Every structure is written in C-alpha cells, then in structure tokens.
Image (tube, rainbow, N blue to C red):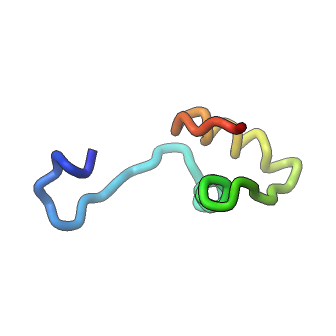
Amino acid sequence: MFKTVSQANPVVVLRDISLQELRGLISYMYKGETLVKSHDLPGLLKAAAQLKIKGQ
C-alpha cells in the first residue's frame, strides 16, 4: 500500500478501531501475546478480524 503512495507522510485511517485496541494488536504482533481485560476482548477480536490478524 505504501509503495504506491507518492506522498512523503501518508495518513492511514483505521475506522472503528480504538487506540487501546491498536496498541493491543501491535503488542500481539511484536511479542506474540497481549494483555487485555475481559470486557475489552470482543472489541480487540473484532479489530483483529477487520485487519485480518490471526492467532496461532
């Protein structure tokens, strides 16, 4: 995606994904695990599905 953009500082809009969910997903991608409260889990799983991030 970024290879085809000619702007120096492109902007990516992630609809319906909170900063907390994004941090959790990035933590999972880099560390292989993340800590999340049980009431936040559905939102995190929904965000992962939207971004096509799968578990092991």
Residue 46 in the image: state x and y as whole percent. Answer: 65, 36
Side (left or right) of 13 relative to 38 = left
Residue lying at 79% horizontally and 45% vertically, measured from the top left: 41
Give the camera-side residue of 34 and 11.
34
Judge from the rendering whether residue 10 lies leftward or rightward of residue 7; answer left or right.
right
Q: How many marks?
A: 0
Q: Which residue is outermost to the left?
A: 6
Drawn side of residue 25 relative to residue 11, left or right = right
Quadrant (top left/top right/bottom left/bottom right) for the N terminus: top left
Q: Relative to residue 14, is residue 54 depicted above or below?
A: above
Residue furthest out toward the right: 38
Q: Position of residue 32 (x, y in %)?
A: 70, 54
**Which residue is rendered at x = 25% and y = 59% of the image?**
10
Q: Residue furthest bottom?
A: 8
Name the residue at 59% across, 61% down. Answer: 19
Residue 56 in which image quadrant: top right
x and y, in percent, of residue 25 in the image: 63, 53
Report x, y in % for residue 14.
45, 48
Q: Is residue 48 left or right of residue 12?
A: right
The residue under the point 75% across, 57% down is 34
